């Protein structure tokens, strides 16, 4: 039976993390263009501070994904931290999202962040002892 090796799990985590981060930056640009005051008063989007934190964490996650791809300890730790914070930042959107699109986005964000953290913490299977 084939098992997922640690290097493969880290590469998968790095790719998913990088893609989620790029998607996060791209989808945040229209919200950032509206400005803080207009975004906060409209009520149809997350608060401006959440958007800014998401962009910042996405940039950090892109850098961390490179380190995780190269199997560097700093990259793995930074990927875990960035995706944990990103998942926590998205979690309130599951309950308080003003639209169904933002609800789905928050739910997918939490799920993908959890998958990335699990893949970063993946260990080699131990051989069975008899």
Image: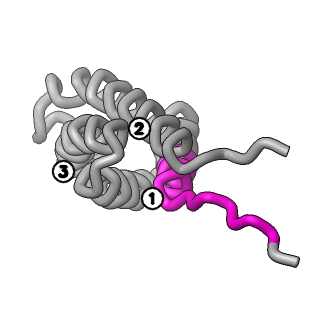
Circle 2: element type: helix
Quadrant, the N terminus? top right
Let me know if residue 103 appears in the view.
Answer: no
- Callout 3 touching callout 2 (CB < 8 Å): no
Label 3 vs label 1: CA separation? Answer: 14 Å
Find disc 3 in the rendering and name its residue: 49
* Furthest residue in direction front, as rendered: 130
Q: Earlier in the sequence, mark 3 or mark 1?
A: 3
Label 1 vs label 2: CA separation? Answer: 25 Å
Picture residue at 34% right of the left edge, 53% below the top: 76
Q: Residues within 10 Å of mark 2 (few under 14, many from 20)?
A: many
Q: Residues within 10 Å of mark 3 (few under 14, many from 20)?
A: few
Give the label, 3 or 2, closer to the camera: 2
Is 21 positioned to the left or the right of 103 in the image? left
Quadrant, the C terminus? bottom right
Query: Where in the figure is residue 122, as x and y percent of width and height?
Result: 56, 58
- Callout 3 touching callout 1 (CB < 8 Å): no
Picture residue at 36% right of the left edge, 32% below the top: 18
Find disc 1 in the rendering and name its residue: 92
Picture residue at 43% right of the left edge, 55% below the top: 87
Picture residue at 38% right of the left edge, 52% below the top: 83
Q: Earlier in the sequence, mark 3 or mark 2?
A: 2
Is 27 located above or below residue 17 in the figure? above
Residue range of the region highlighted in magenta in the rendering? 111-128
Let me know if residue 23 appears in the view.
Answer: yes
Q: In front: 43, or 83? A: 83
Find disc 2 in the rendering and name its residue: 14
Residue 30, image quadrant: top left
Give the label, 1 or 2, closer to the camera: 2
């Amino acid at each position: 039976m084939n098992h997922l090796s640690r290097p493969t799990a880290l590469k998968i985590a790095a790719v998913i993390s990088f893609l989620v981060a790029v998607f996060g930056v791209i989808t945040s640009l229209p919200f950032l263009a509206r400005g803080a005051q207009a975004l906060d008063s409209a009520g149809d989007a997350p608060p401006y501070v959440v958007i800014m934190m998401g962009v910042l964490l996405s940039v950090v996650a892109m850098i961390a994904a490179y380190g995780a791809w190269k199997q560097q300890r700093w990259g793995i730790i930074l990927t875990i931290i960035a995706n944990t914070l990103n998942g926590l930042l998205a979690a309130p959107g599951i309950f308080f999202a003003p639209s169904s699109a933002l609800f789905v986005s928050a739910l997918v964000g939490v799920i993908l962040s959890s998958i990335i953290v699990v893949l970063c913490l993946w260990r080699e299977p131990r051989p069975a002892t008899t």
